[in-house]
Amino acid sequence: YRLVRLMIIEVLLAGMDSKLKPFYREMLISGAGVSKYMPDVLSAAGRESTINTYESLNNKVKDIKSVIDTLPNSVIKERFTGGVSVFYNTLYLIKKSLNI
């Protein structure tokens, strides 16, 4: 699942401001990073931009999950389903930290 998560993280971060990527990468690797790095993200990007980024990440995760759902039942689908599921928890933590 780890390799799948790392691949998905890079897809999620594609096109993101290079100053913010390291913070989001750490938060997406481990949900525990949200409380550690969110103050830095808010300081660098501002609240409104951070909310927009959260919404964009949330939509990208949903899009990725939709593609995974089209795969035939297999070990590969199982790995991708397990790999993407952790991002729902992390996005929830980001949402709660933004009080939205």
Image (cartoon, rainbow, N blue to C red):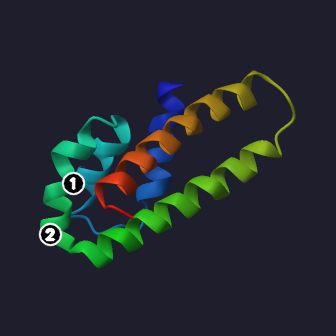
Please tell me which of labels 2 and 1 falls first in the chain.
1
Tell me the quarter of the picture where residue 21 sits. Answer: bottom left
- Position of 63 compared to 2: left or right? right
Instruction: Work out whether residue 38 or residue 15 is closer to the camera in this orientation and state it.
Output: 38
| Badge 2 element | helix
Viewer-nearest of discs 2 and 1: 1
| Label 1 sits on residue | 38
Q: Residue at x 39, y 56 (%)?
A: 95
Q: Residue at x 56, y 33 (%)?
A: 83
Badge number at residue 5: none
For this orientation, the residue located farthest to the right is: 72
Question: Is 50 rendered above or below residue 81?
Answer: below
Question: Is 33 rendered above or below residue 13?
Answer: above
- Which percent across, then down, holds residue 94? 35, 52
Q: CA distance from mark 2 to mark 1?
A: 10 Å
Q: Residue at x 13, y 58 (%)?
A: 40
Q: Crowding at label 2, few (<14), some or many (≥20) Cα neighbours within 10 Å?
A: few
- Which percent across, then down, holds residue 56? 48, 67
| Label 2 sits on residue | 44
Amino acid type, label 2 = Ala
Amino acid type, label 1 = Met
- Which percent across, then down, holds residue 60? 56, 60
- Position of 8 compared to 67: left or right? left
Q: Crowding at label 1, few (<14), some or many (≥20) Cα neighbours within 10 Å?
A: some
Instruction: Work out whether residue 44 or residue 39 is closer to the camera in this orientation and state it.
Output: 39
